[in-house]
Image: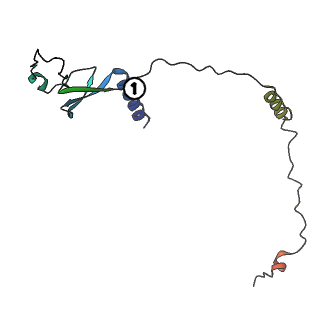
Amino acid sequence: MKRIISISLLLIFLAGNSGFAMVTHYCGGMAMETQIVVGHTELHCGMSDMESGCETETSKENQFKKKPCCENEYQSLEVEDEFQAQVIGSSLSLEFVAAFFATFIGITYSSEADKTEYKNYSPPLIERDIPILVQSFLI
């Protein structure tokens, strides 16, 4: 069980640090292809090769730029390498020191002082006989 957990954590760590990315190719606003790749590779469906640029020279001011037919979207897991250590300020207050010493001064470390003897202990005398009080007799 420990080996399986170790190997799975190792694979997650390697996948996060090696630069795997999930690339989704959108053609006309619809997702056409999704792949898991190393780095950034271009996915294409061939539609971008078919586009022809027919621009007229006369009305460049009134033309709108066409949105490209195909586009790739990259999703990658990035690891934050820059960690900043938090400095914890330790300042002892007077109340803490007083409470610490008040708590631990009264503790005795010898086990002989707290011994309780149970050898000569006798039970207390019964004031009333309970079976007679509740009238519970064996027949």
- Whether residue 20 sits left or right of residue 91 in the image: it is left
Residue 131: image quadrant is: bottom right
Instruction: Tell me what residue is drawn at x 21 percent, y 33 percent.
Output: 29
- Whether residue 121 sits left or right of residue 81 in the image: it is right
* Residue 43 at x, y percent in the picture: 19, 24
Whether residue 109 is visible: no
Vertical relation: 138 (above or below) 51: below
Instruction: Tell me what residue is drawn at x 22 percent, y 26 percent.
Output: 71
Q: Quadrant of the N terminus?
A: top left
Q: Quadrant of the C terminus?
A: bottom right
- Viewer-closest of 92 and 132: 92
- Residue wearing tag 1: 13
Q: From this viewpoint, which residue is outermost toward the top?
A: 57
- Viewer-closest of 90 and 125: 90
Instruction: Tell me what residue is drawn at x 84 percent, y 79 percent.
Output: 133
Instruction: Tell me what residue is drawn at x 38 percent, y 30 percent.
Output: 7
- Viewer-closest of 65 and 26: 65
Residue type highlighted by circle 1: Phe
Residue 87: image quadrant is: top right
